[in-house]
Amino acid sequence: MTTSQILLIDDHAIMLEGLQILLKTGLSNAQVVTAMSLHEALLGEDTPDVIVLDIKLPGINGLAGINRLQGKWPQAKVVMLSSQDDADTQQQAFAHGAAAFVSKTQTASQITAVISAVLEGQDAPVQSSVRPVQAKLTVRQYEVLDWLSQGLSNKLIAKKLTISDNTVRRHLQDIFAFFGVSSRTEAVFAARKQGIVH
C-alpha cells in the first residue's frame, strides 16, 4: 500500500497535535507532518499529497498562501480548514484553489472522510443529511436546504446551524437562484423533484 503524505498547517499547537493524532489513527497509510506557519511549511523538504491549511495564520493567511504552496508542490491538493464555515468563507477558499473545505466544528470521522476522499481523488463528501446531486451549492447551503425542507423558520435554522439570521437569508437567496425560484415553498418543491431532499 502506497504511503500518502499529509502536511498540516495550523498555528494552534493543541489543534495541530489533535489533528495529527486523528489523521494517523483514521488514515493508517498516511504520514503526517506539521507546520505552525506558511513560512515554516515552505521551508520543508517533504512532498505532500494533501495540505490541510488553516485560514487564520500568522503572517500570510491560508487563503493568500494557497498559490505559494501550490507553486512549490503543484501536485498537492489543499483542504482548507477553518472555524468559520459560512458560505462566503467557503467560496473564497474554492476561488483560491482549495480542493475541499473542512470546518473545525465537524466530527473526527467527517474530517477524516473529507481528507481521505481528497487523497483518493474523489469529491469530498458533503456532511449533511441532504443527498447532493449537483456540486454547485455549498455544504452549508445543503444544510440550510435540509432544514428548510423540514419546515423550519429562518430563526430556527440559524439556531440549529449557529449562524446569524442574515447569513441564513443570504444562503436562501443563493438557493433560490440555484433552483431559479423565488420562494421557500418553490425551493423545497424543486429540491424534492430533483431528489435532493426527501
Image: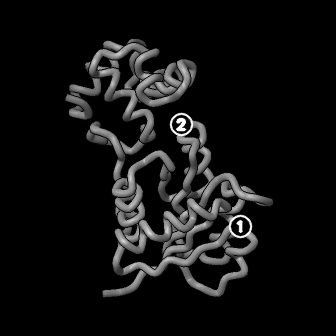
> Would you call the spot at circle 2 few (<14 residues within 10 Å), some (14-19), or many (20 or more)?
some
Q: Give the residue displayed 55% in from the left and 78% down from the top.
A: 33
Decide if residue 94 is on the left or right side of residue 136: right
Whether residue 17 is situated above or below residue 109 in the rendered picture: below
Whether residue 125 is situated above or below residue 39 in the rendered picture: above
At label 1, the amino acid type is Ser
Q: Nearer the viewer, residue 122 or 18?
A: 18
Q: Which residue in the structure is indicated by mark 2?
A: 87
Whether residue 153 is situated above or below residue 140 in the rendered picture: above
Q: Looking at the rendering, which quadrant does residue 9 occupy?
A: bottom right
Residue projecting furthest to the front: 14
> Would you call the spot at circle 1 few (<14 residues within 10 Å), some (14-19), or many (20 or more)?
many
Q: Give the residue displayed 55% in from the left and 44% down from the top.
A: 90
Give how far apart the Cα atoms at labels 2 and 1 are.
25 Å
Q: Looking at the rendering, which quadrant does residue 8 occupy?
A: bottom right
Decide if residue 132 is on the left or right side of residue 37: left
x%, y% of residue 175? 43, 26
Colour mapping used in the image: one colour
Q: Give the residue displayed 67% in from the left and 54% down from the top.
A: 63
x%, y% of residue 51? 55, 68
**Which quarter of the rendered picture does the C terminus lie within?**
top left
Mark nearer the N terminus (2 vs 1): 1
Whether residue 110 is situated above or below residue 122 in the rendered picture: above
Q: Nearer the viewer, residue 96 or 22?
A: 22
Residue 102 showing in the rendered view: yes
Residue 123 showing in the rendered view: no
Q: Which residue in the structure is indicated by mark 1?
A: 37
At label 2, the amino acid type is Ala
**Which quarter of the rendered picture does the N terminus lie within?**
bottom left
